[in-house]
Image: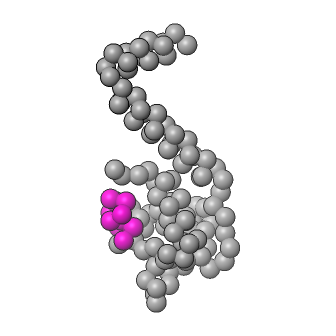
Amino acid sequence: MKKSQMVRIVEFDRQVRQGEYPNSPCFSVDYEVSQRTVLRDIEFLRDQLGAPLQYDPQRKGFCYSEDWVIPQVILMSVLHEDAASHLIAMFRSLAAEDRACVLRGLTMI
C-alpha cells in the first residue's frame, strides 16, 4: 500500500537519523513510489522543512550535515493519519449489519 508524503518523509528522516543512508532507488521500492516522488520528498524535507540533508557518495545515501529535528506538526499529522487508517480498516472488517449499526449511531450524533 502506498504511503502518504508525510509518512514517507517521517520514515526517511528516521532512516537518516539511524545512519541507514537511505537513497531514492531503494526507498522508492520499499514505499512503492517512483524515484522522482522520493526526490520530491527529499526536496520538501530540505527546501520546505529546512533539513540539512546531504548526499554521501561513498555510502550512496543521504545523511544530515548537522543536528536537526523534524517539526512536531509533521509527526502529529502522521499519527492522526495512521489512527484514521486503523479506524477505517476496523470499520471495513465489520459485518455489513454491524457497519450499518455504526453508521446509524453516527447520524444520531
- Residue 103 vs 37, above or below: the answer is above
Left or right position of 53 against 97: right
In the rendered image, which quarter is residue 24 located in?
A: bottom left
Residue 106 percent coordinates (x, y): 49, 16
Q: Is residue 32 magenta?
A: yes
Residue lying farthest bottom? Answer: 58
Q: Is residue 27 magenta?
A: yes
The residue that appears at 66% across and 69% down in the rendered structure is 68
By what rule are the colours in the image chosen?
one colour
Number of labelled discs?
Answer: 0
Q: Between residues 44 and 12, which one lies in front from this camera angle?
A: 12
Residue 86 percent coordinates (x, y): 45, 38
Is residue 7 visible to us here? yes
The residue that appears at 33% across and 15% down in the rendered structure is 97
Give the main secondary structure, helix, strand or loop, of the magenta stretch: helix
Q: Quadrant of the C terminus?
A: top right
Is residue 43 visible to us here? no
Range drawn in magenta: 26-35
Left or right position of 74 against 21: right
In the rendered image, which quarter is residue 52 located in?
A: bottom right
Residue 87 percent coordinates (x, y): 46, 33
The residue that appears at 32% across and 65% down in the rendered structure is 29
The residue that appears at 36% across and 52% down in the rendered structure is 2
